[in-house]
Image (cartoon, helix red, strand yellow):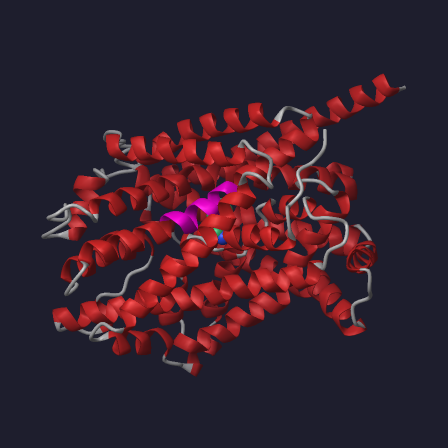
């Protein structure tokens, strides 16, 4: 069966940037800057991008493009026994990260609808509203409480939307969706930034966001967070960029595409930070407190601080709220669809199943999995699964990719492929930079981060959760999906052998 093919290189870029730009860019990046030295944080972030992020992005692009295949088939092509390194990420991102990511998008979509209600349901105390009324948060990981009907309903609607987009071939589904969503996302973000900057107190917020503190460069934790954020943000180690690049035409400039994707992703993060911190500055001004007492990241920022700010805006509160949550929904959806595409590409490539069947089954199963995260313990489960999959899954996959390509498979094959695809050579210095990054810098950085996470795990239980919860849920998810990737690898091996013997 013929594989999908992007309608244009621009369409591919929009999809790759769409995958990279997600909730993390909006609710985490600017907070990390604030916490880790303001503008100075751009130094470790930029270096992380230059020495690990962009080289690995080029690697994933080159691999998918050369093999014309999704992650498992590409890994199989470079090292038969390591096919699971391709399966594992598409499985744990699809049936781990994406399963709760869509629930978070559902929270955003509901808050978007609530923004046009008057009075706002969160009026009075946004924190109590979010945690207790909206989520129905319970006291412990094993006390599931009850499923929230609005959240489950919205989650199902979003899975349906994602199904509707992904069931089509990539150029008619993901590409069309990104061509609509990405420009809208950019316009919305610009509106929020400009609007935010005109609020009183905004400059104080922006100062807190970017005020340089050079001493922070000496703290290793700052570097660790820069690498971690950059890695997650570029959707590296997800198997997504491999699948996306496999739909590019033979002639394409992969290195340039990687630079554009990374710069657009980083640029969007910096830009969105202005919207976040100008509103935080305004909040601090209205409350008569310092910016530091209103700063939060993640769900706390979007569902506690922002709603309060929306209530307190001088005018057009509902419009602002609606636009803000719509921005999050769009940023989230373009990321969520990218991993569905990566998983579906893998299943279609390796099992030869029909696209419609795979997309339908995958969306149904994942939607069922999302239900866990709509219960009263959902936020706690999310926190644990997120921590384990990010700290171990993604980093291990990135590390193995770099080692397998850098040391096992001859990297000059990919060098050669890059020039062949460009139909021209890259300057010698580029080749050296890329090879050194893939062979030495990226594996070293990722290995350090991994070792550090393991040490932290033993030093104190993550997030203060009971050890049995961490082992059962966090480690369980990591190991469960790992075993599944082994099963898939063995299963397709038999299938490949069957096909081969039938061909004889
Ligand atoms: N890059 C995305 C982000 O920053 C991460 C992501 C990709 C999450 C795909 C889910 C699916 O949010």
Outermost residue, right direction? Answer: 504
Above or below for 368 versus 201: above
Query: Residue 436: which quarter of the image?
Result: bottom right
Residue at left offset 21%, top offset 75%: 201
Query: In the figure, is residue 457 to the left or right of 74?
Result: left
Magenta-drawn segment: 329-337
Residue 389, how many percent across, how many down? 49, 45
Query: Residue 432: which quarter of the image?
Result: bottom right
Helix, strand or loop for the magenta stretch, by majority? helix
**Residue 332, magenta (yes or no):** yes
User: Which quadrant: the C terminus?
Assistant: top right
Residue at left offset 18%, top offset 51%: 127
Query: In the figure, is residue 378 to the left or right of 241?
Result: left
Residue at left offset 40%, top offset 71%: 36
Residue at left offset 25%, top offset 67%: 280
Q: Is residue 476 visible?
A: no
**Residue 404, magenta (yes or no):** no
Q: Nearer the viewer, residue 356 or 473?
A: 356
Above or below for 290 versus 384: below
Residue 216, how many percent across, how many down? 43, 77
Q: Nearer the viewer, residue 47 or 444?
A: 47
């Amino acid at each position: 069966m013929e594989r999908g093919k992007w309608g244009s290189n621009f369409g591919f870029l929009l999809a790759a940037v769409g995958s990279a730009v997600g909730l993390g860019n909006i609710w985490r990046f600017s907070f990390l800057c604030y916490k880790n030295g303001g503008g100075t944080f751009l130094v470790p972030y930029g270096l992380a991008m230059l020495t690990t992020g962009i080289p690995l992005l080029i690697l994933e692009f080159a691999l998918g493009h050369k093999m014309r295949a999704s992650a498992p088939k590409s890994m199989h092509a470079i090292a038969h026994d390591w096919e699971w390194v391709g399966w594992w990420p598409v499985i744990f991102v699809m049936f781990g990260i994406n399963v709760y990511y869509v629930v978070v998008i559902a929270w955003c979509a509901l808050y978007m609808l609530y923004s046009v209600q008057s009075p706002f349901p969160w009026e009075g105390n946004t924190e109590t509203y979010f945690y207790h009324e909206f989520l129905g948060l319970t006291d412990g990981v094993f006390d599931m409480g009850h499923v929230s009907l609005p959240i489950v309903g919205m989650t199902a609607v979003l899975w349906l939307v994602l199904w509707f987009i992904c069931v089509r071939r990539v150029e008619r589904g993901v590409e069309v969706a990104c061509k609509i969503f990405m420009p809208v996302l950019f316009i919305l973000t610009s509106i929020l930034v400009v609007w935010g900057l005109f609020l009183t107190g905004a400059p104080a917020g922006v100062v807190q966001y970017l005020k340089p503190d050079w001493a922070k460069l000496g703290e290793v934790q700052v570097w660790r967070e820069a690498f971690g954020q950059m890695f997650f943000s570029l959707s590296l180690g997800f198997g997504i960029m491999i699948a996306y690049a496999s739909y590019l035409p033979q002639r394409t400039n992969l290195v340039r595409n990687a630079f554009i994707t990374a710069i657009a992703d980083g640029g969007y993060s910096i830009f969105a930070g202005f919207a976040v911190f100008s509103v935080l500055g305004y909040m601090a001004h209205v409350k008569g407190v310092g910016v530091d007492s209103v700063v939060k990241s993640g769900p706390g920022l979007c569902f506690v601080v922002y709603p309060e700010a929306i209530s307190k805006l001088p005018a057009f509160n509902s419009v602002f709220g609606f636009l803000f949550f719509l921005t999050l929904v769009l940023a989230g959806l373009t990321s969520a669809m990218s991993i569905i595409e990566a998983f579906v590409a893998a299943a279609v490539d390796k099992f030869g199943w029909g696209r419609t069947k795979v997309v339908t089954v995958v969306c149904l199963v994942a939607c069922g999995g999302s239900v866990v995260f709509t219960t009263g313990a959902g936020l706690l489960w999310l926190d644990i699964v997120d921590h384990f999959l990010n700290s171990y899954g993604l980093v291990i996959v990135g590390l193995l990719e770099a080692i397998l390509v850098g040391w096992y498979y001859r990297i000059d094959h990919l060098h050669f492929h890059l020039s062949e695809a460009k139909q021209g050579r890259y300057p010698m210095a580029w080749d050296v930079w890329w090879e050194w990054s893939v062979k030495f810098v990226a594996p070293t950085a990722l290995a350090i981060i991994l070792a550090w996470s393991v040490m932290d795990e033993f030093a104190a239980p993550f997030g203060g959760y009971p050890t049995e919860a961490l082992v059962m849920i966090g480690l369980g998810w990591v190991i469960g999906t790992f075993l599944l990737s082994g099963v898939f690898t063995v299963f397709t091996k038999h299938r490949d052998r069957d096909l081969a013997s039938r061909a004889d």
